Amino acid sequence: MKISLICVGKLREKYLSQGVDEYAKRLGRYCSLEIIELADESTPDNAPPAIVAAIKKKEGDRILKAIRDDSYCIALAIDGHMLSSEELAVKLDKLALSGNSHVSFIIGGSLGLSDEVLARANYRLSFSKMTFPHQLMRMILLEQIYRSFKINRNEPYHK
C-alpha cells in the first residue's frame, strides 16, 4: 500500500520533526510513505471572512494538485467520522482489500480545508471535537496509521 500524507505548512519544531521521522521509519516495514508539504498562506489576525475564504482556496488548490487521480482521499476534518484505532485499522484493511492501493490523508492549514478539497475527499476523518495544531496532527496521524498496521497484522504494540 502507498500512503501519501499531504500537509499544508512545514514542521517548525524539532521535536515534531523527530516524531514524524520516527513513525515514517517504522511505517517503512508496512507501506510506502510519501509526505508532501505544501506552502501555507500568511493569515492576518482577525482576517475578514473573504480573506479567510481566499486563503483556504489558495491552499486548497495546492492540495488538489497534489492528490493523485487514483488515490482514495481521507480528509482530516472536525466534522468527520470519529473512529477508534481498531476501526481505522479495519478501514485501511478494507481499502487495501478492495483494490485501493493508494491512500492520501489530507491535513489542512490553520484555517482548515477548502470546500473543494472536502468535496474531493472520499472520507472525512475526525480525531476529536477538539482542534489540534496541524503540525502536531501530522505526528498523531502517522502514529495511528502505524498502529493500524500493527493491529491488522496482530503484532504487539509497545509504547
Image (cartoon, grey):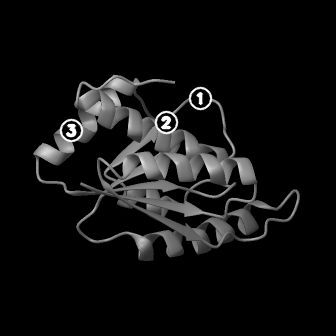
Figure label count: 3
Q: What is the spatial separation of the Cα atoms under label 2 and label 1, in whole angstroms?
A: 7 Å
Label annotation for residue 93: 3
Task: Please report the residue visible at 52 percent of the width from the left and 33 percent of the height from the top.
Answer: 127
> Mark 2 — residue?
126
Other residues around mark 1 within 10 Å, as few (<14) / some (14–19) / many (≥20): few
> Mark 1 — residue?
129
> Decide: marks 2, 1 in contact (CB < 8 A)?
yes
Look at the numbered disc 2 and give the secondary structure of its residue: strand
Rendering quarter of residue 59: bottom right
Q: Earlier in the sequence, mark 2 or mark 3?
A: 3
What's the residue type where badge 2 is placed? Ser
Look at the numbered disc 3 and give the secondary structure of its residue: helix
Other residues around mark 2 within 10 Å, as few (<14) / some (14–19) / many (≥20): some
Residue closest to the eye, 49 or 150:
150
What's the residue type where badge 1 is placed? Lys
Q: Is residue 10 above or below residue 76?
A: below
